[in-house]
Amino acid sequence: MIDAQTLPLPDFPKVRYSAWQLDALSPSQATYETPQFLTDESGIEVSGLTTTYLALSADLQAQGVRLTSLMAAQKQWPELVGDLMHRVIPATTDRFTAQNAAQYNTGIFLYIPAHVVVPDVLHLVLNQLALTGDDLVARLLIYVGAHAKVSLLQQLNTIGDQKTKASVVIELIAAADAQVNYANLDQFGPQTTAYINRQAQINDRATVDWANVAFSDGQVLTELRSHANGEGARTHVCVSALTYQKQTQGFVTAVQNVGRHSVGHIFQRGVILNKSTLVFNGIGRIIKGAKGADAQQESRVLMLSRRARGDANPLLLIDENDVTAGHAASVGRVDEQQLYYLMSRGLSQTVARRLVIRGFLGDVLAALPTPSARQRVIAEIERKLQDEQ
């Protein structure tokens, strides 16, 4: 077994996180009794070590769809889980992933066989129990078979107010011709310092579209990487983030084009309030042999405070000639004329700023698959603007 402490830390340029001690975790053993976020939806809610909600139609079960906690899946289908685990993210990638692989004790498992079309949004909810000061160490493992189709809404939440840490690793495998819409809403609490690593393996002609909404209140590092390995593989990555108070959020959003004629687009939008910090690192890589590949990225940061700090750092690594690639990035303050126009129509400054933020994040919010998820994000925008006063 490799000692995690001998591996390098993950690289988050322009983010100082060494003092966060994310490589020193004590996995929580906390359990819970009742669901907090799901009532009659299709999906699963795992709170600490407990599955507090599980609903999957008899028809999907008959077609071979498997949805359960990761620990239960390892007992029930050990060979299947073992075959899929670490296929996207090797356990020795870096110190944080190695530690997660060695210490995780909760999570979610979803397996969708070939040709299965899931008609409704599947909800995957993971709740951190910040009740004792111990840490969440979790994994999500998702497989979508050939020609299968699914829309996912995954949530990360905090129950409790103890100071704690979280390490969450998500592996998604999309087989040939699969179609996956993956939306996530990250809302860890203010006392939580978190590392989130989401990665997808995308095979021939498969599509994975991400809508990553990062609205946690604490200090957070987020990796989101798509590996467009197959010919004609496609991925569109939309990221929205809102930071406030003295919070720091750092992102590495990357697409690697390996397959011929693969497409990878990154679209990031961030809003910064108060004395917070937001750093977007975008990476588009086209491997030698990926002829006809398309790699594009755009990162925009809107600063609503002169005391905030924002960075948008695009990087293109191109090893093939017959490709299309480009990037755009900007960090700027809110348009004072736009605010003045709205306020001249009788709106308060708070309402005007709220509308500017909604408009700026609108494309990403529109990608959320349910009205309730969009309303939850809008409520968070309003709460953080009120806290700013």
Image (cartoon, rainbow, N blue to C red):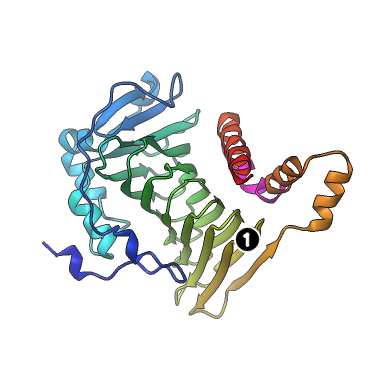
- The answer to which image quadrant residue 65 occupies is top left
Q: Quadrant of the C terminus?
A: top right
Q: Main secondary structure of the magenta part?
A: helix
Residues 317 and 223: in front is 223
Furthest residue in direction left, as rendered: 1
Q: Is residue 366 magenta?
A: yes
User: Can see residue 66?
Assistant: no
Determine the residue positioned at 21% across, 45% down.
27
Figure check: 225 above or below 356:
below
Task: Locate residue 361, reporting x and y percent.
Answer: 65, 49
Determine the residue positioned at 38% across, 64% down.
17
Q: Amino acid at mark 1?
A: Val
Task: Locate residue 319, reporting x and y percent.
Answer: 48, 80
Relative horizontal placement of residue 104, taking residue 296 as reference (left or right): left
- The answer to which image quadrant residue 301 occupies is bottom right
Residues 276 and 371: in front is 276
Task: Locate residue 315, reporting x and y percent.
Answer: 53, 74
User: Can see residue 121?
Assistant: yes
Figure check: 377 above or below 52:
below
The 10 Å Cα crowd at callout 1, few under 14, some 14 to 19, many 20 or more, is many
Dot 1: element: strand
Relative horizontal placement of residue 60, taking residue 298 as reference (left or right): left
Label 1: which residue?
Answer: 301
- The answer to which image quadrant residue 116 occupies is top left
Q: Is residue 295 magenta?
A: no
Task: Locate residue 89, reporting x and y percent.
Answer: 31, 58
Determine the residue positioned at 80% across, 51% down.
339
Q: Quadrant of the N terminus?
A: bottom left
Q: Count the labels in the image.
A: 1
Furthest residue in direction front, as rendered: 389
Residues 18 and 206: in front is 18
Extent of the magenta region: 359-368
